[in-house]
Structure formats: C-alpha cells, structure tokens
Amino acid sequence: MKRIMAPGPVAMLRLLPLLLLVSCGQQLAPPAPGPGTESSPYRAGAASGGAAVYAVDPRASLVAVTVRRAGLMARLGHDHVVASRTLAGQVAPGAGSADLSFRLDEMSVDEPQLLRDAGIDKQPSAPAVEGTRTNMLGPVLEAQRYPLVTLHAQQQADGRLRVAVTLHGVTRWMALPASVQVDPARVVASGTARLKQTDFGITPFSVGGGLLSVQDELEVRYQVVARR
C-alpha cells in the first residue's frame, strides 16, 4: 500500500490496500465454495433481484487508507494516506447489497487535506510522494497484475455489512461497521475500520531487520455516495 521512512526507497507501502480499501473489522468465517469465494469473486453490477439500483458517485465518494510507521527508528520515517476517489459500482438498498470497485493505479498518495484529516502534520516532498507511489504499485501490490480492488457487500439484520474484499488476488469475508442512510434520491454509507495486510498475503515493508517498518494494521475511512 513508501517512503514511510526517511530517505530513499519510499517503497514503504507494503500495505494498503488497500486497500483497500475499503474493508475492515473482524474477519468472518469463509462461506461455502461458490459465488464470492476466492475462486469466484463477486463482480460489480451483480443482480439486484429487481430492487431499485443506485449508481456510485465517485466525486462524492472516498476511500482513505492511513499507513503508520513502526520500529525502533520510526521517528526517521513518515506516515502516509493513500486514497481512492474513483470508486465505481452499484448499490441496491432494497436487496441489501452493493458491488463496488476501484483501480489501484488511480489512487492518490498524501493529499495535504487527507494528511491533516488523519492527524499527520508532515507533508512529504513531491519526489518522495512519487517514489512511494511507484513502489506501492510495483513490487508491493503488483498493480499491473492485480489492478482492481473489488467489494461485494451484504447488509445484515444488525445493520453491519458483510463484505467480500478481493485484493491482490485474495478474497476475504469481513464484518464492516457502517452508518447507512437511504432516501429516494441517494444512499450514503460511511465508517472507519481496520484491516491487516497479512490477511491478504502482503508482508509489511521493513528495512534494517525491522528497525524501520510499516505497521501491519491499516485504518480505512470510507464514504460511499450512490445516486438513483
């Protein structure tokens, strides 16, 4: 998911996920083989059973992943925020489901306002940001091979979302706390959750035998706005 370190290889983002984004809290037991499993991940635009469908508005939607440094030399590194503003997909509130996706190569790195929102007061230089992005998309996330993060969400009776997140070729089912508001014109879902890179087979970046590294756990803040 960077130069979360002081110098050179801002390769810092062995994380994300990404990202992913979007995704979250407590991992659930995997379902029986079939739609939504690793061998057959959900696709954006899945059938909604005739329920009203709302299209995601990427201009109003956001997935922001905060990446924190770790290790005895953490003071030499930087924290980062990686974000997607190109979320696409559909929400069918009547069916209690949604199918979403975003591209890793369209994610931004260290937008000033998002850094401030995350309580990060250091703005990396432009070369550092570009280095972080290059390393994130390359050896860490292999974005050319796995360009998309996809999510299939199902709302449960308690209001939480059960989400199948596919990242880096791995699909995991997770429980995602969410605030969901529905009216005739739009649907808004928002929340903050945490996920671990290692749940998706990603090894957190580290140098010097772990003296400077990236925390395994990522904080994911999201807002999804879909319009009728």
Image (cartoon, helix red, strand yellow):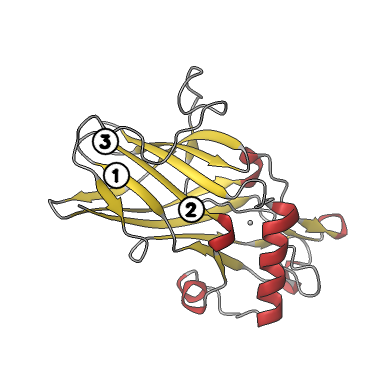
Classify mark 2: helix, strand or loop: strand
- Residue 45 on image: x %, y %: 36, 40
- Residue 150 on image: x %, y %: 48, 43
Q: Residue at label 2?
A: 102
The answer to whether the residues at label 1 and label 3 have Cβ atoms under 8 Å apart is: no
State which tag comes first along the sequence, 2 or 1.
Answer: 1
**What type is the residue that disc 2 sits on?**
Phe
- Residue 17 on image: x %, y %: 58, 51
State which tag comes first along the sequence, 2 or 3.
Answer: 3
**For the residue carrying disc 1, how many other residues have a C-alpha within 10 Å: few (<14), some (14-19), or many (20+)?**
many
Classify mark 3: helix, strand or loop: loop
Quadrant occupied by the N terminus: bottom right
**What type is the residue that disc 1 sits on?**
Val
Is residue 33 left or right of 177 when viewed as pictured?
Answer: right
Q: Nearer the viewer, residue 154 or 119?
A: 154
Residue 13 in view, yes or no: no
Q: Residue at x 68, y 59 (%)?
A: 136
Classify mark 1: helix, strand or loop: strand
For the residues labelled 1 and 3, the Cα–Cα distance comes to: 8 Å
**What type is the residue that disc 3 sits on?**
Gly
Q: Residue at label 1?
A: 91
State which tag comes first along the sequence, 1 or 3.
Answer: 1
In the rendered structure, find residue 96 and report the number of the disc placed on it.
Answer: 3
For the residues labelled 2 and 3, the Cα–Cα distance comes to: 21 Å
The answer to whether the residues at label 2 and label 3 have Cβ atoms under 8 Å apart is: no
For the residues labelled 2 and 1, the Cα–Cα distance comes to: 15 Å
Is 201 rendered above or below residue 54? above
Q: Residue at x 12, y 51 (%)?
A: 184
Eye-nearest disc, 2 or 3:
2
